[in-house]
Image (cartoon, rainbow, N blue to C red):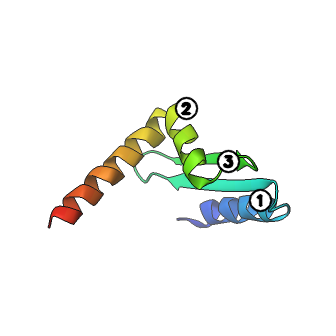
Amino acid sequence: MNSTQEEAVSTLLGWAEEDVDSRGLLIIADEEDSTRLVYNGTELNLVAALATAMRKDDNIRQVCAKAMKWHRIAKLK
């Protein structure tokens, strides 16, 4: 992660921490594409936020599918 990306992530995390009861943040980074940011509010937990992100963004869905595939392969070894 370069310094600009680190600064952006730091700023967003600071924003979410200002009101932890009503703000949440999920950051998904894909080296081949770009960084995707997904905001989840008080009604959603991490799993629900990720499911929503996958439903709305094909790139995130593909990244998650690759991660699941790599996990299955690693588990077989």
Measure the C-alpha gap from mark 3 to mark 1. Answer: 14 Å
Identify the amino acid type marked 2.
Answer: Lys
Q: Position of residue 12 (x, y in %)?
A: 73, 58
Identify the amino acid type marked 1.
Answer: Ala
Q: Which residue is mark 2?
A: 56
Q: Which residue is mark 3?
A: 44
Image depth: mark 2 or mark 3 in front: 3
Q: In the rendered image of this protein, does residue 43 appear above or below residue 1? A: above
Q: In the rendered image of this protein, does residue 44 appear above or below residue 21? A: above
Q: Which residue is mark 1?
A: 16
Viewer-side residue, 71 vs 43: 43
**Residue 24 picture quarter:** bottom right
Identify the amino acid type marked 3.
Answer: Leu
Q: Position of residue 57 (x, y in %)?
A: 52, 34
Q: Residues within 10 Å of mark 1 (few under 14, many from 20)?
A: some
Q: Position of residue 22 (x, y in %)?
A: 81, 54
